[in-house]
Amino acid sequence: QSVLTQPPSVSGAPGQRVTISCTGSNSNIGTGHDVHWYQQLPGAAPKLLINGNNNRPSGVPDRFSVSKSGTSASLAITGLQADDEADYYCQSYDTSLSGYWVFGGGTKLTVL
Amino acid sequence: EVQLVESGGGLVQPGGSLRLSCAASGFTFSSYWMHWVRQAPGKGLVWVSRINGDGGSTHDADSVKGRFTISRDNAKNTLYLQMNSLKAEDTAVYYCVSQGGGYYDEFDYWGQGTLVTVSS
């Protein structure tokens, strides 16, 4: 069971807007730690999609954005495209016990 | 261009050992914290170990503490993971990952991964 909770799956039609939630606790997201998001295309390694300050690596379109409130964060994808179909993971830092880096369980995005 | 290339994975029996390597290029390796993150077949991402830039500080997940050792050779731009007393639940793809800032920064570059299978 992951420290950060994500929905197992979301779906949307091309052109639509979808959001993926990431729920944590007062020892990670709730402390103000940044939440970063990664995209894993089928059969590939994960890659950084967008960081907690809404900064995207070169090549990532501005259709992807993030927000955070309290102990939760969200990734929004607008203008959904077929090649957005992938697994998405949120990640933060947890200060409980000895402290460690934590991920959500991942969300499978299906483009209908 | 940043490249992280893992090697050393394979099939090992329970209780056995394996050493993973990650060759880094395209960035100032010694300035970056480095991590190992693993992904069991069909499962999500799990952080394993972290080492700071000069190798003087390490941090391991409870699940591998005392069995795995992360290290680095900045002269060779290479990260290592020594895995001992391997268990079936260690079966996963292991990714080498860089982190440019401190604790709260993103994992900015990922390798392609190397598969470790623990089975008799």
Image: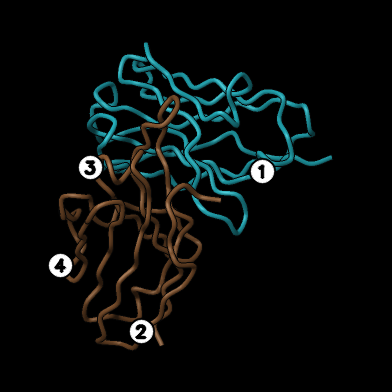
Chain colours: A brown, B cyan
| Mark-to-mark CA distance, 2 and 3 | 30 Å
Residue on which disc 3 sits: A32
Three-letter code, disc 4: Asp
Residue on which disc 4 sits: A62
Q: Tell me the crowding category of disc 4: few under 14, some 14 to 19, or many 20 or more residues within 10 angstroms, Cα based.
A: few
Q: Tell me the crowding category of disc 2: few under 14, some 14 to 19, or many 20 or more residues within 10 angstroms, Cα based.
A: some
| Mark-to-mark CA distance, 4 and 2 | 18 Å
Under tag 2, what secondary structure? Answer: strand
The answer as to whether the residues below labels 3 and 4 share one chain is yes
Could you say where residue A88 lies in the image, as x and y percent from the top left? 39, 62
Mark 1 near mark 4, Cβ–Cβ under 8 Å? no
Residue B14 placement, left or right of B77: right
The answer as to whether the residues below labels 1 and 3 share one chain is no
Sequence-first tag of 2 and 3: 2
Residue on which disc 2 sits: A12
Look at 79% across and 33% down and name the residue there: B14
Residue on which disc 1 sits: B91
Chain of the residue displaying label 3 = A
Chain of the residue displaying label 4 = A
Under tag 1, what secondary structure? Answer: loop
Three-letter code, disc 2: Gly
